[in-house]
Image (cartoon, helix red, strand yellow):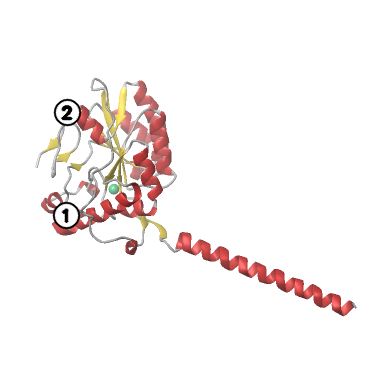
């Protein structure tokens, strides 16, 4: 009797062990296919202090779909008598941070332009969609933050096509404009990009200081009517700075808006190859 009971207990132990092993395999497979299988999470570009996601390039189709619809982005009608500042966020989207920026903008009746990397848009398509759906402007910052002047015009175009493709896949809309990384532009860049080249007039250097108060201070000290402010939504101190500075700017009578809203309200028309630093500082092609 005693021996039989022992054997039964052993069998139960074996079954429990087997269940645990199967559970480990299932959970492991789920983790690998949904997370690690897609990309090696993120890396930091030390030279710019920038944060980029290394996505799997093979996930993408090649070349631009010629039947691209135009951008679905519709700028708000802005009160032209108001002082306007365009906020711009480069190098994202980054899930979590970007959503916080969107919420802060919404809370303060503000909107902004997001110059996204194709790589990151590919990794966070839901965030791209949220940016557009919340009335913000989706634009391109190239596929992988390449220094464009070293490329041929065809290679520049390929970078933009790939980025436009992935943004289109994420939100059903084409990017409105392009900001070349580092603001680096030559003839090939002008030829390879079909929109105006949006630069900036106030550089917060948020990627360098990674300091909320320093970013807030720079904006309040330098930003004036017609300016375009450069920030990066991939850094948490920047997100906190946005949350802090928006109510202050509102109190000072500023309307924080997207680049398209700023240009439209100021009656400025831009075209392919124009370098746009602010509503009043534009170098025409
Ligand atoms: Zn950048």
Give the CA separation, mark 1 to mark 2.
31 Å
Q: Residues within 10 Å of mark 2 (few under 14, many from 20)?
A: few
Q: Nearer the viewer, residue 120 or 3?
A: 3
Q: Position of residue 265 (x, y in %)?
A: 21, 27
Q: Quadrant of the N terminus?
A: bottom right
Q: Quadrant of the C terminus?
A: top left
- Residue reaching furthest left? 285
Tell me: 28 left or right of 38. right
Q: Residue furthest right?
A: 1
The disc placed on residue 267 is: 2
Picture coordinates of residue 126, whole percent (x, y): 40, 47
Disc 1, SS: helix
On residue 149, the disc is: 1
| Label 2 SS | loop
Describe residue 200's horizontal placement relative to residue 97 as left or right.
left
Image-quadrant location for residue 255 = top left
């Amino acid at each position: 009797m005693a021996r039989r009971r022992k054997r039964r207990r052993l069998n139960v132990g074996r079954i429990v062990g087997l269940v645990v092993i199967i559970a480990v395999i299932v959970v492991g497979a789920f983790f690998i296919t949904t997370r690690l299988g897609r990309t090696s999470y993120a890396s930091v570009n030390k030279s710019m202090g920038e944060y980029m996601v290394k996505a799997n390039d093979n996930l993408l189709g090649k070349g631009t779909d010629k039947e691209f619809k135009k951008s679905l982005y519709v700028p708000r009608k802005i009160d032209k008598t108001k002082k306007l500042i365009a906020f711009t966020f480069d190098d994202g989207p980054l899930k979590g941070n970007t959503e916080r920026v969107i919420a802060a903008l919404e809370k303060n009746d503000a909107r902004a332009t997001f110059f996204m990397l194709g790589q990151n848009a590919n990794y966070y398509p839901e965030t791209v969609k949220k940016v557009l759906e919340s009335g913000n402007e989706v634009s391109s910052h190239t596929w992988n933050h390449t220094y464009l002047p070293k490329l041929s015009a065809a290679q520049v175009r390929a970078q933009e096509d790939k980025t436009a493709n992935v943004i289109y896949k994420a939100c059903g809309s084409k990017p409105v404009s392009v900001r070349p990384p580092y603001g680096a532009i030559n003839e090939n860049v002008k030829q390879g990009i079909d929109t105006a080249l949006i630069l900036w007039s106030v550089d917060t250097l948020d990627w360098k200081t990674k300091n909320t108060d320093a970013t807030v201070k720079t904006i309040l000290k330098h930003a004036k009517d017609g300016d375009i402010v450069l920030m990066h939504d991939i850094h948490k101190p920047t997100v906190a700075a946005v949350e802090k500075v928006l109510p202050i700017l509102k109190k000072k009578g500023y309307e924080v808006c997207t680049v398209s809203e700023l240009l439209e309200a100021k009656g400025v028309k831009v075209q392919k190859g124009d370098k746009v630093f602010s509503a009043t500082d534009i170098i025409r092609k």
